[in-house]
Amino acid sequence: MTNPMIGARANRVFFLAAALSLVPAHLAAQTARAAAAYDYTGYWVSEVTEKWRYRMLVPDKGDYVQVPLNPEGRKVANAWDPAKDRAAGEACKSYGAAGLLQVPGRLHIYWQDDNTLRMDTDSGTQTRLFHFGGSPPPNETPTWQGYSVAQWGGTEPRDRRDGQGGPVQDSTGRQVIAREQRKEADYLKVVTTHMRPGYLQKNGVPYSGSAIVEEYFDTFSDPYTRNTWLAVTTVVTDPQYLVEPLIMHAHFKKIPDGSGWDPTPCSANEPR
């Protein structure tokens, strides 16, 4: 059964992100790690709460009813042949950045340096790097995970006001900023380009090298289960194969450590 907290929070993040496109200016002076208001690091495991038969099983060839493919995209999907992918050394086509978080498995997220957040997956043994600041280098070589530019999304911290509209002060006259209004970043936004062509589903539903992937990461505690969750909303735009953007969701539960970590190679026609 889907936890109502997960879906509501994921939808909130998506619509908030759509309305907010600028990073507060004061964040630029800090490292990305210092500017983070929430902790995304640690180990996480997939909780498949939607599209179960498309994620936990390999769908039948031609089963792409939930993907807005254009005629060219349907033609490519209908020609899917996992044996050809294996023979060509392209078993990782469904583990590229656009589809990776739809593959059930575990994540390990940690800071590679102060401005690079790293995500490793045990499914497919993939690594994604989220680069804060800047843009992809010129002539960046396409890879399965592409080049990801990250930024914190949120609102400017504002002073808590007293009953007369003035800022709250302590006994020494110093202005007090309310704890709940010191949050400098409400979610993590990641935009990925420069990807090798891959699959949105394990049954050969394609995305092209021209695709753009936008992701919105949000973490929160669930008072019903007392678990910590990571909700990810993914928006894939692909002028070559899609008639409109594809929106997907993935949810992960935080786990204490990496004791269940199980790196597995890419598979052309297995769920993992």
Image (spheres, rainbow, N blue to C red):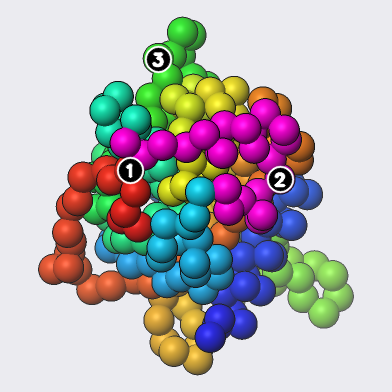
Name the mark on residue 141: 3
Residue most toward the right? 164
Q: Which residues are magenta?
A: 62-83
What's the amino acid at mark 1? Ala
User: Where residue 233 appears, x then y in whole percent?
Assistant: 59, 55
Residue highlighted by disc 1: 268
Tell me if I can see residue 211 in this picture: yes
Residue most toward the left? 259
User: Where residue 95 appears, x then y in whole percent?
Assistant: 38, 42
What's the amino acid at mark 2? Pro
Q: Of tags 2 and 3, which is closer to the observer?
A: 2
Give the secondary structure at mark 3: loop
Give the residue at x 17% y 68%: 260
User: Where residue 137 appears, x then y in whole percent?
Assistant: 45, 14
The question of residue 89 being in magenta is answered with no
How many angstroms separate mark 1 from mark 2 (CA)?
22 Å
Give the secondary structure at mark 1: loop
**First in sequence: mark 3 or mark 1?**
3
Give the residue at x 44% y 25%: 196
Q: Report the quarter where the C terminus lies.
A: bottom left
